[in-house]
Image: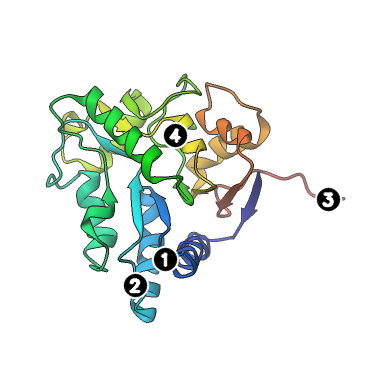
Amino acid sequence: MKITNLGTRSYASFYVACELYKQMSQHPHSKLGLATGGTMVQIYQYLVDLLHKNQLDVSQIETFNLDEYVGLDAKHKESYHTYMRDQLFSRYPHFDASLIHIPQGDASDLTIEATRYENLINQQGPIDIQILGIGENGHIGFNEPGTDINSPTHIVNLTESTIQANSRYFADENEVPKQAISMGLATILKAKRIILIAFGEKKRAAIEALTNNEVDPEVPATILHAHPNVEIYVDDDSAPRIEPVV
């Protein structure tokens, strides 16, 4: 596991966008694990620009999103289906819709939906690059502290800190979903390569916990110590404090 400080959000976002573009251009049947949230917005902006400039054929690219809120249908303005359409798929409308996979948060049977999604990843994978953000409490995907390290895709009860962090996207805090469907920690570890990105001072403690600890169920991101190919990119504000060389 290697942490690289790329200085600014913009530099780090462009770098990760280039890595995604390179994977797609060199391997046109790539499987990509995608993430949502504020961390990813500029990454997708740069990626869309690169795709348009080069008119890349993405018709065989297959994507798998990490998670979706429980209770929101695909057209809800705060669903991750809507996020992905707005940030990527409608801005470069050349992806094959049948190869875009996002959990169904309004499924009638959530347990069956979680199993379906896990089986789909196992059948179509492995994922070539899995992109991750990190929560202030160290969660990845929506795998909150205490999540079983062997967890497959599952239903998650969101912690109060995660609900609070997500409330900025909703007009009323009471509207923030309390559950999500998320790839499990074991699911994430099946990816060939993992890139985790963190921006802002609020993420520094999580990054420091990740770098200072071996696998700790109370800091879900530390499961990445068990993966052989993990890269972490941060900006100045989220970079772990380093003692000056004297």
Q: Residue furthest right?
A: 246
> From mark 2 to mark 3, how far is it between C-alphas?
48 Å
| Tag of residue 245 | 3
Q: Do callouts 1 and 3 mark residues in contact (Cβ within 8 Å)?
A: no
Residue at position x 56%, y 53% in the image: 233
Measuring from the top left, give residue 109's x and y in whole percent. 17, 24
x and y percentages locating residue 99 in the rendered image: 28, 54
Q: Earlier in the sequence, mark 2 or mark 3?
A: 2
In this view, the residue in front, 232 or 226, is: 226
Structural distance between the alpha carbons of marks 1 and 3: 45 Å
The vertical placement of 226 against 80, above or below, is above
What amino acid type is highlighted by mark number 2? Asp
**Which is closer to the viewer, label 1 or label 3?**
1
Q: Which mark is residue 187?
A: 4
Label 1, residues with CA under 10 Å away: few <14, some 14-19, many ≥20: some
- Disc 1 target residue: 28
